[in-house]
Amino acid sequence: MSFLWTSLKNALRAQAASWRTWLLLLLLPALTFGARLALPAEEVATPVQVGVVLPDRGGEEFWNRLDERSGRVVTFCRSDGDQAERQVAAGRWDCALVLPEDFEARLARHDTYELFTLLVGPGSTVYPMVRETVTACVAELTAPGVAEDYLVDSGILDREGAAQARPRLEETLLEQERVLVSMETVDGRPLDPITLADSGVDGLLAGLVAIVLSIWVLFAAMDLGRWLDSPFARRLRPLRGTTALLLPRMAGAVLPALCSGALALLALERPWACLLPLTAYLMFWGALALVLARCRAVWSALPAAVPFVPVLALLLSPVLIDLSLLFPALAPAVRWSPVSLFLRACGGSWGDGLLLAAVGAVIPAVLWTVDRCAKDKKTG
């Protein structure tokens, strides 16, 4: 144990004397905080803005229902026609909704054909969802009248009975009487649009941190492989074992990465939710580096392979886009990629974080056991 402790102290001392370590400690937090500051605050708080142009008279009840649905996913902004056209053309608003002057009269006679004019621009993306929201508001306003007409036309009630039943038709259903729609992600977790809007930037920054740290650990594996191939390490391997030599040096390389990653995650809205997953993630990559450093053919090829790591990490994780939704054959690779496991652990899936930590603990234990068995076989 004293050998491991001494080796760890020497490894940390060597890392402290390396300019690459300090570059990582300073550059990665600066990168995440810079990305956070570069994002416009209003876009983070209100991802999509939609204009609403009401007629000179009427439309207030419709606007109240629409305004109730405003939030941090879609925000409806009341405006006039000229302002709506300018904002949509400039790209500040995703789209705009224009109500006709006879809006109230058409609603009264249940004439909803081409009731609205929707202004869209080249960059408009959410107008289908806006149409669904508008349709829901119109349905709420017209539903009592439609139900009354149906009761009369079908002979269930006469006009006098329908008038008496009108208050009942206008009542709001209780929660247990409604048809409720629940949303969930592909992996079965509940989906809250508000949480989704807030977590987009955090997921991007956390994924960026994970990819940079994985590259750091791969370069550390290459350094370990070169050191293991040195005359000093060759003489020491039969006495101490390969894993005993590599483990403290790998820990010395991972600890600065952990500190840098923890500082970088402070740029997130909920950094404490990612600290334990980050530890498990680095445990996984540190364990993998112990395997890579033992194979000369592998660690010597890492300089050529490392440039492909960020590309594969982005393609096989939902940092930018989940490709498994477009190509279902990629679903297993996306589901079990280290970056995906880390991001899900940051989102509260402790099972994924425990999986990373378990792999990071089992691999060194297996390597240590193999070394001990090989040493006992030689001495026996």
Image (cartoon, helix red, strand yellow):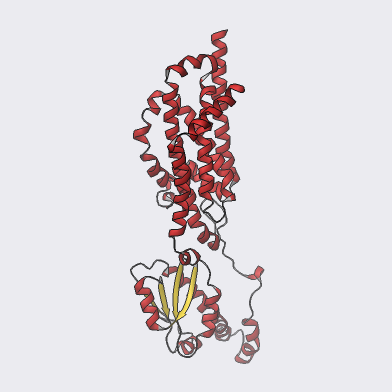
The quadrant where residue 190 appears: bottom right
- Say above or below: 248 vs 48: above
Is 346 positioned to the left or the right of 205 in the image? right
At x 40%, y 43%, the residue is 310
126 or 173, nearer to the observer: 126
Q: Which residue is located at x 66 percent, y 68 percent?
A: 176
Tell me if residue 39 comes above or below residue 67 in the rendering: above
Residue 321 or residue 220, whichever sits in front: 220
The N terminus - image quarter: top right
The percent position of residue 249, horizontal first and vertical second, equals 51, 28
Quadrant location, the C terminus: top right
Q: Is residue 170 above or below residue 247?
A: below
88 up-or-down from 239: above or below = below
Looking at the image, the residue that sits furthest to the top is 380
The residue nearer to you, when weighing 300 against 62, is 300
Residue 258, visible in the rendered structure: yes
Residue 274 screen position, x and y as percent: 56, 48
